[in-house]
């Protein structure tokens, strides 16, 4: 399953991969005409829309490919570097780059391709780029607030727009095709050319358009795995068909007291609820964060009894459905939820009358367990919580 | 195959570029980039020329904390070295090699080179704020459907169209 780095391809080999990818990248940029500043600037003056055609086609192709690979289980989108969204830094930075594009006629990648074939203006552009980084570096204390402010997370655009991934993908494909047709028309007006598409290519263009629309429609019906599993898990009808193994409050209390090495308490509540009451040794993994590769090792470890706890049994069963869909084994759901655990263990009071032997045993156990577990919880408060730190794939520029 | 100096069909080039980007995502889990390599080169340069300054200023120390190895040992530096090779090979087979200053019909070479430097400066600065340039933030960000990537792309091209009018005599 991709990405192949770092498991299949080591970090050192990755540098060779970088070189090879760079060669392909540079070759395509130059072949597309991106080594020419006049061609690049043409997109802003209507005489040459090559930039838009290449750029849009590339973005849509890579997007469609990664959505399909992810759906087929060949690519783990949770491990992919999603450019984080720092709202104002993106807007201001983008605006500065836009002005730089018009004035300089290149962007950094294309200037490298231009420099490689001897364009002297590209060399000056590259020199300017270094100066630009220097300006940022030297003024960093002044820029830092804008640079690090307005952080909104690793947002996905379809979530930001309240669409499904598929609907957005189809929209992007159609937007690209619309832009291709519109800009072709504009280009013909500006350059006074009668016909842009050569007759011999008409058939290919029709096929291209048809294929793009077909892929767009396919993407519309390709759910992303995470949304699909989460949606399934919150469907009550589906939950009724799913069996969850249960663990009673007494068994959990017994295993906690026994410090059972097989026990793995997984708290699926929100982080602040977890912080308020943390069972001894519990880790906080919600149904959403369970997809993250950082928990892979922990959730795949053998000989574990994984108890999912939530405020209610239903919430825990929901998380269990997700866990099972992800192939996590040996999961149990805390019967009655934390509410029952608190009532029957943490805040246990003996009933007024104790009946048969079994009830008497339970009563004795609970009376012993209640203060002991309360003490474990208090002790654990002073210890650092289990936080898994995984080096995420670094990306961006 | 005939040796042709014409450019590749843009849709075909875009499709191939998309495949390169997809392969990058599949293999490495990250996207393409360019400005990050300039950053590495600059940091490496400053650390060599003015080590005392680099060890005192926050920008450089933050970078060193995140990248304990030499700044030049970065994925993007290797990738950009590849871009130089790939670009050169493409120019070679399409017969486009040669030292030229490309400019609009009404611009002198000196002006063009000054403008190229200034444009580069702005692009380098902007790319630091946006954490990437047209390749790293806009193209790669769009491919993984990052909201930030789309915002950066719209900001770059939106601003480009807004200011294009004022710089028209440099290009047309």
Image (cartoon, helix red, strand yellow):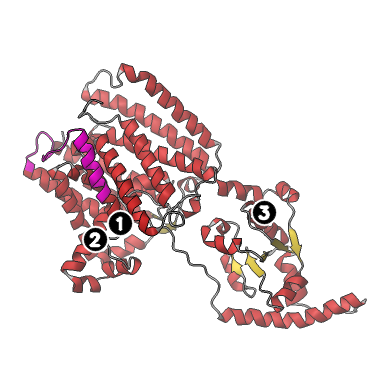
* N-term mark: 3 or 2: 2
In reply to whether residue B103 is colored magenta, the answer given is yes
Quadrant position of residue A309: bottom right
Q: Nearer the viewer, mark 3 or mark 2?
A: 3
Q: Which mark is residue A321?
A: 3
- Whether tag 2 and tag 1 are in contact, CB under 8 A, the answer is yes
Position of A143 with respect to A349 (left or right) is left
- Whether tag 3 and tag 2 are in contact, CB under 8 A, the answer is no
Q: Which residue is mark 2?
A: A136
Position of A301 with respect to A24 (left or right) is right
Position of A245 with respect to A127 (left or right) is right
- Vertical arrangement, residue A35 with respect to residue A134, above or below: above
- Vertical arrangement, residue B142 with respect to residue A209, above or below: below
Q: Give me the C-alpha separation between circle 2 and circle 1.
A: 8 Å
Q: Residue at x 65, y 57 (%)?
A: A319
Q: Give me the C-alpha separation between circle 3 and circle 2.
A: 49 Å
Q: Residue at x 11, y 43 (%)?
A: B112
Quadrant position of residue A343: bottom right
Q: Position of residue A255 (x, y in %)?
A: 72, 74
Q: Dot 1 lies on which element?
A: helix
Q: Which residue is mark 1?
A: B129
Which contiguous range is marked in magenta? B81-109
């Amino acid at each position: 399953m991709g990405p192949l780095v770092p498991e299949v391809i080591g970090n050192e080999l990755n540098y060779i991969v970088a070189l090879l990818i760079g060669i392909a990248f540079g070759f395509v940029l130059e072949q597309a005409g991106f080594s020419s500043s006049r061609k690049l600037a043409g997109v802003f003056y209507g005489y040459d829309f090559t930039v838009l055609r290449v750029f849009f086609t590339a973005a849509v192709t890579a997007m469609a490919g990664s959505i399909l690979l992810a759906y087929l289980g060949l690519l783990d989108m949770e491990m992919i570097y999603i450019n984080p969204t720092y709202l104002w830094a993106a807007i201001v930075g983008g605006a500065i780059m836009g002005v730089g594009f018009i004035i300089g006629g290149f962007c950094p990648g294309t200037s490298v391709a231009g420099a490689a074939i001897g364009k002297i203006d590209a060399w000056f552009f590259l020199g300017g780029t270094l100066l630009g980084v220097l300006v940022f570096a030297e003024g960093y204390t002044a820029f830092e607030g804008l640079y690090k402010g307005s952080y909104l997370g690793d947002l996905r655009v379809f979530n930001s727009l309240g669409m499904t991934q598929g609907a957005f993908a189809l929209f992007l494909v159609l937007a690209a095709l619309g832009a291709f047709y519109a800009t072709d028309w504009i280009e013909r007006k500006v350059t006074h050319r009668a016909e842009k598409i050569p007759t011999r290519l008409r058939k290919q263009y029709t096929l291209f358009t048809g294929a793009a629309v077909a892929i767009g429609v396919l993407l519309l019906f390709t759910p992303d795995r995470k949304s699909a599993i989460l949606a399934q898990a919150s469907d009550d009808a589906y939950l009724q068909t799913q069996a969850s193994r249960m663990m009673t409050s007494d068994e959990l209390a017994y295993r906690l007291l026994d410090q059972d090495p097989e026990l793995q308490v997984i708290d699926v509540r929100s982080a602040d609820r977890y912080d308020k009451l943390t069972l001894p040794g519990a880790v906080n993994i919600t149904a959403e964060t369970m997809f993250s590769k950082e928990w892979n090792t922990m959730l795949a470890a053998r000989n574990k009894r994984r108890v999912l706890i939530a405020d209610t049994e239903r919430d825990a069963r929901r998380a269990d459905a997700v866990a099972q869909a992800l192939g996590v084994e040996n999961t149990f759901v805390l019967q009655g939820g934390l509410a029952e655990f608190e009532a029957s263990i943490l805040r246990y009071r003996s009933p007024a009358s104790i009946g048969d032997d079994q009830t008497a045993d339970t009563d004795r156990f609970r009376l012993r367990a209640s203060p002991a577990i309360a003490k474990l919880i208090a002790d654990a408060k002073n210890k650092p919580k289990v936080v898994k730190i995984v080096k995420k794939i670094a990306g961006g520029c | 195959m005939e040796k042709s100096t014409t450019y590749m069909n843009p849709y075909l080039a875009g499709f191939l570029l998309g495949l390169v980007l997809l392969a990058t995502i599949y293999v490495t889990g990250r996207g393409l980039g360019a400005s990050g390599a300039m950053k590495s080169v600059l940091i490496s340069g400053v650390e060599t020329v003015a080590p005392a300054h680099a060890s005192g200023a926050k920008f450089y120390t933050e970078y060193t904390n995140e990248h304990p190895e030499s700044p030049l040992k970065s994925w993007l530096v290797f990738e950009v070295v590849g871009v130089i090779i790939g670009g050169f090979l493409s120019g070679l087979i399409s017969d486009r090699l040669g030292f030229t200053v490309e400019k609009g019909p009404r611009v002198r070479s000196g002006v063009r080179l000054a403008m190229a430097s200034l444009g580069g400066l702005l692009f380098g600065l902007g790319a630091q704020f946006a954490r990437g340039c047209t390749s790293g933030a806009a193209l790669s960000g769009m491919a993984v459907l990052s909201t930030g990537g789309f915002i950066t792309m719209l900001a770059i091209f939106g601003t480009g169209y807004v200011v294009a009018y004022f710089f028209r005599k440099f290009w047309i």
